[in-house]
Image: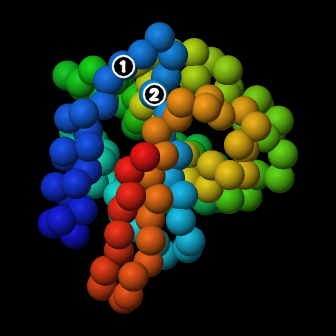
Amino acid sequence: MKETYQIAKDFAGELSTFQKATILGFYGDLGSGKTTFTQNLALVLGVTEAVTSPTFVIEKIYKLKDQKFTHLIHIDAYRIEKSSEMLHLGWKEITDDPKNLIVIEWPERIADILPPDMKKLEFIFVDETTREIVIN
């Protein structure tokens, strides 16, 4: 967990704001560390409330203070059947705001609405105590 926190901290320091929201796609199998990384990223960004996977609610929004981003939006697209379902969650509005940092678990489920320049992180389950994170 300490290593994941440091990777999240280093990664957060490299993030820049753009003309639209910054979108991070987290790829990997169940149990590969996507939510754990999101929890550590949220901690680095000052989120004090518990960060849990939004598997059943699809989306959770956390307010950020004194950061380059004003919101961390955590989306779990695992249960999404069509990317058009994201429109009902305010997809256009959240992606148009350059102050939003959007983390999407299972981005392959909504690939057709994601920007081609999205930052991609691949989480690889190595063994019970080891995960590998590849940042593209």
Image coordinates of residue 12 in percent, x first then y, are 26, 39
Dot 1: what SS? loop
* Label 1, residues with CA under 10 Å away: few <14, some 14-19, many ≥20: some
- Give the residue displayed 44% in from the left and 64% down from the top: 123
Query: Disc 1 marks which amino acid?
Result: Thr
Residue 56's place in the image compared with 97, above or below, is: below
Image coordinates of residue 124 in percent, x first then y, are 44, 71
Residue 78's place in the image compared with 10, above or below, is: below
The residue at which mark 2 appears reads as 22
Contact between labelled residues 2 and 1, with CB atoms less than 8 Å apart: yes
Classify residue 29 as left or right of residue 69. right
- Give the residue displayed 24% in from the left and 33% down from the top: 14
Farthest residue toward the top? 19
The residue at which mark 1 appears reads as 17
Between the C-alphas of marks 1 and 2, the distance is: 6 Å
Image color mode: rainbow
Image coordinates of residue 43 in percent, x first then y, are 24, 48
Classify residue 108 as left or right of residue 11. right
Image coordinates of residue 112 in percent, x first then y, are 76, 37
- Give the residue displayed 36% in from the left and 62% down from the top: 133
Residue 41's place in the image compared with 30, above or below, is: above
* Among the 4 quarters of the image, the one containing residue 51: bottom left
Query: Disc 2 marks which amino acid?
Result: Thr
- Give the residue displayed 22% in from the left and 69% down from the top: 1
How many marks are shown on the rendered structure? 2
Farthest residue toward the front? 136
Residue 65's place in the image compared with 54, above or below, is: above
